[in-house]
Amino acid sequence: MDLNLSDEQRLLRESAERFVAESYDADHRRKMANDPLGFSPDVWTQFAELGWLALPIPEEFDGLGGGAVEIGILMEAFGRGLVSEPYVATVVLGAALIERCGSTAQKQASLPKIADGSLKLALAHSERAARFDLAKVATAANKTARGWRLAGSKIAVLDGHAADEIIVSAHIHDHRGPSGRIGLFLVPATAPSLSITDYPRLGGGRACNIELPDVHVPEDALLGDGRDALPAIEWAIDRAMAALGAEAVGIMQTLLETTLEYTKIRKQFGRPLSANQVIRHRLADMAMQVDEARSMALRAALKADSTPIERARAASGAKAKIGKCARFVGEQSIQLHGGMGVTEELEVGAYFKRLVAFDTLFGGSAHHYARHARLGRASVPA
Amino acid sequence: MDLSFNAEERAFQDEVRGFIAKNLTEEMKRATALTPSVFSDPDIGMAWQRALHKQGWGAPGWPVEYGGPDWTPAQRWIFETESARAGVPNVNVMGVKMVGPVIIGFGSPEQKNFYLPRILSGEDYWCQGYSEPGSGSDLSSLKTRAVRDGDDYIINGTKIWTTHAHHASRMFALVRTSDGPRQQDGISFILIDMKTPGITTRPILTIGGDHEVNQVFFDDVRVPVANRVGDEDKGWTYGKYLLEFERGSGIASAKLREGLKAIADLAESDLTGRAIDSPDIATRISEVEVDIDALEMTELRVLSALQTGQNPGAVSSILKLRNSEIRQAVTRLGADVIGHDALAVEPMRPLYKLNREPATPEEMLTVVPEYLNGRAYTIFGGTSEIQRDIIAKMMLGI
């Protein structure tokens, strides 16, 4: 049992924190918020050079073989600067699903390109009618003479506008109708008749809705051998929630520090705000919740490769708890900044909005406490 | 980074399990499960202390030269976790975890030689004389006075909330020996034999129906100056040192987990009409479980930091705050889970000596008293408000 960072992990943290501090400031973030791409291709190239795109990819595919803990270290630093590059879409979700589901040829075709920065991916899984139920997929995949025909609609696709290829989940149909298996299909963003409507995402970056009105893809677009991909999707999204949880911790830490500074400087009634016990106690609660969130993000990362139920409970527990902490820390940061907190002149609002996006993505606290409870009673250890 | 135990740690875990299986009697286990107060009755607690002492495990946190087992932080974690899982009795923490470390840190060689073995063996039972009727959160305003008279102090005043004073053979107390410019100056840390003439103890019944705390009166109580720990007027420093131990040395999550498990088992039982089938109850159980997970990870992070010699600092206040709040959430949940059975009051104590059929099933007997007594968790050892002051000052610098 040891929760101290290794030397490599410490180096990763230092270099990520340094990069974010030097490359990301308020001007850069404002520029990105109005940018049609929403992130900087130059920064993406630097990510590749720093080895961050290769981080979780196995060494045999030109990766560094890192795990969820290393991803968490990186993501926490990203949170400090509200990084908007499509890291989760491409690396945490995309590369993970290809590694887990793809054939050797598919992995060989994609993973080294993700690692060197020349391939960006997105996962198109969520559908309007499914809400947060990962098993509910109405998009259909029908076998044709030359491959597959995909038909359906996807929403909330993270960074789909920037992706070269989109991993689309679809319910595989055979001659009897729905097979009960979900397949993952690698669809080029340029596929005929596929349409992408992108929009600025709450808290930075972009997302899109995708229409697939009979999109034809070749046979080998299906990742792997066509067995049900739902367990892989759950696995990948659990990992993404751990990674996003770490990012939320970084965001909360920045908000805590910013708010603390402000309450020391801002004077009312002839003394700093922080001279009031009600303010000090609020900040103590915020600090405590940041610390709890940090513990939960780390826990979810450390259990990312456990048994499915243990992993899922750790991920849902973290998502629910960090979401709750994030709302508190974010809302109180605005409150303690007073009127300035609700303006676009300060960045408190931008950080808060990213936290709201975190809490919403893949289901909020209520959804994940319920999932945690559902998975729980079957798995109580003896 | 690794959450799992290595081979040595697993071997130690087996050793602890073996020890508990051999020494924890059914009677001790049942008595502990049926104790709704914070502390076990001394006859149960001290029987366990004697068993631990025989094994050389009487004082896990002490240096090896004073009889500590020389465990790593991971070993302490395993010991505490296995103890909680098995439901072992509480030992006299005022001796082992509170006054012991102060005597080790600041006591004279004579004090160490006399008192420490008696704590280990369970021969002495200690209580803590800190709070006074006029000095709660503002502890250093205390007024119980010790006046020098030759080789003795003569003590007058009163202490309150004194847990198990009615069982204790000795008390460690903070007393005023002079009036310095600051109220923290002029306090001394003194060890008092509870049989000394002039000491009277008045029971205070708490809302859960238990007699655990007392008020203790001192009328011209003569205590040798040799019983003072460290320097005269410097007791505040030693007293604060002790409070940090009280708040931060605990590994609380394992006990909370067992408490929640008992409630979840009730919720899954026909005794409560399967309370768990209500989505609200199921979700609340998960919410509390996740809070325990978070506390456990924080405890493990602190332990890992300790293992490399880092100082956890004000995090002891975070641990105390969260432990007390989660404890209250567990007991509140329990009172809701048992439904109408929460209406029944069982005044008999100790519950494990109840010699008639209770109005509710035995596994529910402690639920409401624990909820009621549990309100004290955010008050004793420094209220939650004081802990927030400490966090703001020590961690945030405001």
Image (tube, coloured by chain):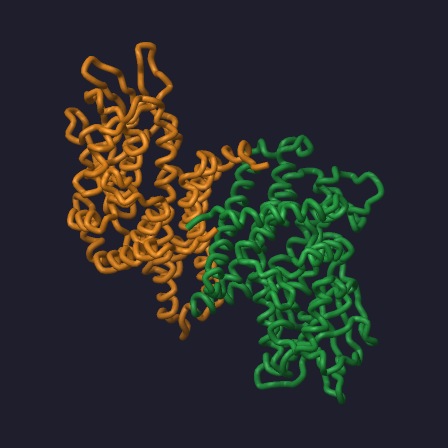
**Where is residue B221 shown, x and y percent of the image?**
79, 79
Q: Residue at x 37, y 40 (%)?
A: A239
Taking the view exactly as shown, the residue that stands out farthest to the bottom is: B150
Q: Report if residue B133 is visible in the image.
A: no
**Quadrant of residue B324 within the rendered picture:** bottom right
Q: Residue at x 47, y 34 (%)?
A: A309
Q: Report if residue A45 is visible in the image.
A: yes
The C terminus of chain A lies in which quarter of the figure?
Answer: top right
Foreground residue, A204 or A70?
A70
Foreground residue, A1 or B102?
A1
Task: From the viewer's perspective, tell me whether residue B295 is left or right of residue A224.
Answer: right
Instruction: Look at the picture and state if B113 lies above or below A95.
Output: below
Which chain is depicted orange?
A
Looking at the rendered structure, the number of numbered marks drawn on it comes to 0
Foreground residue, B361 or B148?
B148
Task: From the viewer's perspective, tell me whether residue A183 is left or right of residue A1.
Answer: left
Taking the view exactly as shown, the residue that stands out farthest to the top is: A176
Task: From the viewer's perspective, tell me whether residue B17 is left or right of residue A340.
Answer: right
**Quadrant of residue A103 within the rendered picture:** top left
**Where is residue A124 shown, x and y percent of the image?**
28, 32
Which chain is depicted green?
B
Instruction: Look at the picture and state if B186 lies above or below A213.
Output: below
**Quadrant of residue B337 within the rendered picture:** top right
**Where is residue B58 shown, x and y percent of the image?**
67, 59
Q: Residue at x 41, y 48 (%)?
A: A297
**Where is residue A216 shown, x and y percent of the image?**
19, 21
